Amino acid sequence: MAAPGEEEDAMARYRSPLVSRYASAEMAFNFSERKKFGTWRRLWLYLAQAKRKKNKQKVKVLFLLQSLGLPITDEQIREMEANLDNIDFKMAAEEEKKLRHDVMAHVHTFAHCCPKAAAIIHLGATSCYVGDNTDLIVLRDGFNLLLPKVARVISRLADFAEKYADMPALGFTHYQPAQLTTVGKRCCLWIQDLCMDLQNLERARDDLRFRGVKGTTGTQASFLQLFEGDHSKVEELDRLVTAKAGFKRAYMVTGQTYSRKVDIGVLAVLASLGASIHKICTDIRLLANLKEIEEPFEKDQIGSSAMPYKRNPMRSERCCSLARHLMTLVMDPLQTAAVQWFERTLDDSANRRVCLAEAFLTADIILSTLQNISEGLVVYPKVIERRIRQELPFMATENIIMAMVKAGGNRQDCHEKIRVLSQQAAAVVKQEGGDNDFIARVRADPYFSPIHKQLESLLDPSSFTGRAPQQVAKFLKEEVRPVLIPYQSMMGGKIELAL
């Protein structure tokens, strides 16, 4: 096959499906080259710029390095401000090819469009000043994109749980029939995990600090020299640049980089979110097989190229597939943090370019997909009722025994009668493929005549769900709705999936 020409067809190059098929435009931009290098330029500007109130008048832009004793002019600052997003990516690529250093390539590219400011760009800084600080900004912004999506999924599922709080459904332990629950109560188990994830993501975002202005090995030696040994000016520079970037705190000590354990914490909470979504979507897939609940299915959607009748749970399957990828990504920062030597080694860089972006992109995709699923879940009450009818007679045996004893019967005699009849009914189900006829056998046996009129009430499914409806109401009111309050303005409308 011939190599692509200079005017290369985009389809002749591999493109990550995370971006080309699934991710939102907002999250894709957050990890884009334009966001990255535009942030680099802003960080160079922050070294020379700060804001403060003067004489209670409106905020005035001052020049931090200038105010701390360095000769930086207003004209240089204005030139930098005017070119923050005027990035010549072709020139930057050529510079990087020549210099083999991405930061210096962009220093030269920025200087090219800011000739008056060229002398002060990157003054006293190290590559990690722009690299690591940009990563922290991008991670923070990534969390801010994910959190409303988690809240929206919780909100949709909460509405679903409330609607079906009272609907009995067969419970499963070991994927074998167990006591009854309700459709809404089962959904609350999903919601509880997502509420934990919401809190974990909020905590991880709020725990992020800025690397700040620390120099080549974290000692701030270059800035101490710039300010002629004035430690207070170095500390003030670090504080003001940190505030300018929107952070409340900076890490007090760093090597050349911020500790790579920070990345472990970030990806760990995303991996935990992936586990929650995998569990939810696995449950939905199993329920779809039972024909009790299905994810939305579009009018023209095709389930199988060979079997036109199929309605495959492809959205849930996509979530499970990508969630597995998300859960494995936390291994990358674990190994990276373990092998960082002393103040820093560069074997972290290429790995972090991949795993950090992919973790947030993947989390973004599965949250959007789960929101779409939760907005269109289809419940089949008749199927659920039929399955309950198949299993409930066996579950009602203890109630029948108690009723017989109250009517004057002997507990041991009744137990033996029930044992024989239930095994006969089980044989009909398992060996003959018939319906559970246990109750019919009880009705036909004169021994149980004292309670024949009570059988209907003894078999009411709602009497087997315990406090499930009340648990749903209390959980939604006291735990779920309150955590959604900060996100009320971001709940948005329904989400449509392109694929």
Image (cartoon, grey):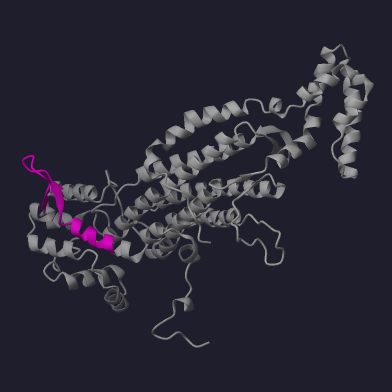
Q: Residue at x 86, y 32 (%)?
A: 438
Is residue 351 positioned above or below 472 on the image?
below
Q: Is residue 400 left or right of residue 32?
A: right
The stretch of residues the image draws in magenta is 38-62
Residue 184 location in percent, x, y? 60, 35
Is residue 97 positioned above or below 182 on the image?
below
Residue 408 location in percent, x, y? 87, 11
How many numbered marks does the figure carry? Answer: 0
The front one of 231 and 40 is 40
Is residue 339 positioned above or below 426 on the image?
below
Residue 336 location in percent, x, y? 44, 57
Q: Is residue 43 magenta?
A: yes
Residue 47 location in percent, x, y? 18, 56
Is residue 273 positioned above or below 416 on the image?
below
**Whether residue 72 is visible:** no
Q: Is residue 5 left or right of residue 469?
A: left
The front one of 296 and 211 is 296
The front one of 309 and 147 is 309
